[in-house]
Image (spheres, rainbow, N blue to C red):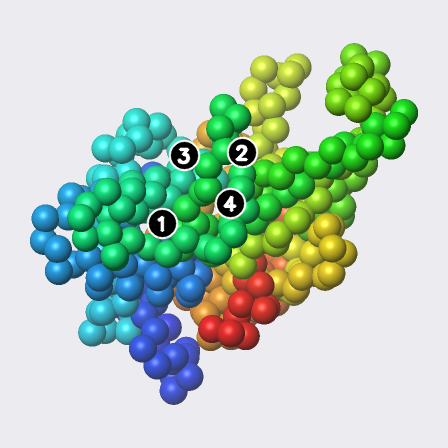
Amino acid sequence: MGAAGSKLEKALGDQFPEGERYFGLENFGNTCYCNSVLQALYFCVPFREQLLDYYTNNKTTGDVEENLLTCLADLFTQISSQKKKTGVIAPKRFVQRVKKQNELFRSYMHQDAHEFLNFLLNELVDILEKESNAAKSSPDASSSPEKIANGPKIPLSNGVQKEPLVTWVHKNFQGILTNETRCLRCETVTARDETFLDLSLDIEQNSSITSCLKNFSSTETLNAEDKFFCDKCCSLQEAQKRMKIKKPPHILVIHLKRFKYIEQLGRYKKLSYRVVFPLELKLSNTVDDADSEYSLFAVVVHVGSGPNHGHYVSLVKSHNHWLFFDDENVEMIDESAVQTFFGSSQEYSSNTDHGYILFYESLATSSKS
């Protein structure tokens, strides 16, 4: 990597961003699912900055028990404080912690990058919530993290309402969906809100993110055995239902459902469909119909023809340059190369490198940062 590192430095020359670090991550036997997600998160600048702040604020308390959050903060700090601009880092402690925490990731089998991202973000939220509760119950509660004023009251699955703590993970990734159901007899609309950290979209051949989002929010009629119980009519009625984005997140993570269970085969199949993801995205399926504009800054790519084997790499935009991260290797790529990861318009193609998780940052956020 020494040569590749210096090659990257040569390629960027005096355009190498001040204070930025581009480090490959060592693979510990099929840990590319983890490395590709870590690179995308590292170049999610607001998230990185809050993680580095967390490290700075917590390193003084020496008795902090090691957990996934401390290991991740440690890894990001290690990368950002390197003297060299490029190189390779071994995320050994972090990977060991992941395996210790979740048996799903213990084997050397091919893992799913989306499952890992989901597990990681939810785990970070749990740790921050526990820390906040511990801080509140301790005598010195003045240091407890702030609560967002009149944040959304989200009903929990068991029906108990509680004011949720809004952590910095939520502030970056959390959006709110609203599920609207309109009774076709009395026209009453029932709306139920739910939070999300990423959106999983069904995909079709030769489509785009915009069309996938339209399908996600399309109106569905509930009839026959799917009728809806209307509280106003006090009976089962035909209804129309649709999902809209009530509060778009600052960082929009879109997961393309490329792995589909095929009943006849009794197994999952990878859909290599061509799905165009634009560098600039307008979200129009929002409740208030105001377009939210986003800019693409990272793509986790699945390489391979099937769901149980293959490889993950990531594309990252940093200071207007696109970089390609493949475990230990980092190289510059042209922006036009991003479109080679849309997928294949024919069923059987030699191209098996397909965009799988997309990371978009709200332009409103990035102009502030």
Cβ–Cβ below 8 Å for labels 1 and 2? no
The Cα atoms of the two marked residues, 4 and 2, are separated by 16 Å
**Which residue lies under the disc numbered 3?**
111
Residue at the image point whose x is 34% and y is 43% from the top: 129
For mark 2, give the secondary structure.
strand
- Pick whichever of labels 3 and 2 is earlier in the sequence: 3
**Which residue lies under the disc numbered 2?**
155
The Cα atoms of the two marked residues, 1 and 2, are separated by 35 Å
**Which residue lies under the disc numbered 4?**
197
Q: Which mark is residue 35?
A: 1
The Cα atoms of the two marked residues, 3 and 4, are separated by 20 Å
- Pick whichever of labels 3 and 1 is earlier in the sequence: 1
Residue at the image point whose x is 51% and y is 45% from the top: 197
Q: Is residue 222 left or right of residue 253?
A: right
Local crowd size for mark 3, using a 10 Å CA cut-off: few (<14), some (14–19), many (≥20): many
Identify whether 114 is placed above or below 364: above
Residue at the image point whose x is 46% and y is 70% from the top: 318
User: Which is in the foreground here, disc 4 or disc 2?
Assistant: 2
User: Which is in the foreground here, disc 3 or disc 2?
Assistant: 2
The Cα atoms of the two marked residues, 3 and 2, are separated by 32 Å
For this orientation, the residue located farthest to the bottom is: 14
The amino acid beneath tag 4 is Leu
Identify whether 275 is placed above or below 222: below
Q: Is residue 322 left or right of residue 32?
A: right
The Cα atoms of the two marked residues, 3 and 1, are separated by 12 Å
For this orientation, the residue located farthest to the front is: 139
The picture places residue 281, in percent across and down from the top left corner, at 67, 61
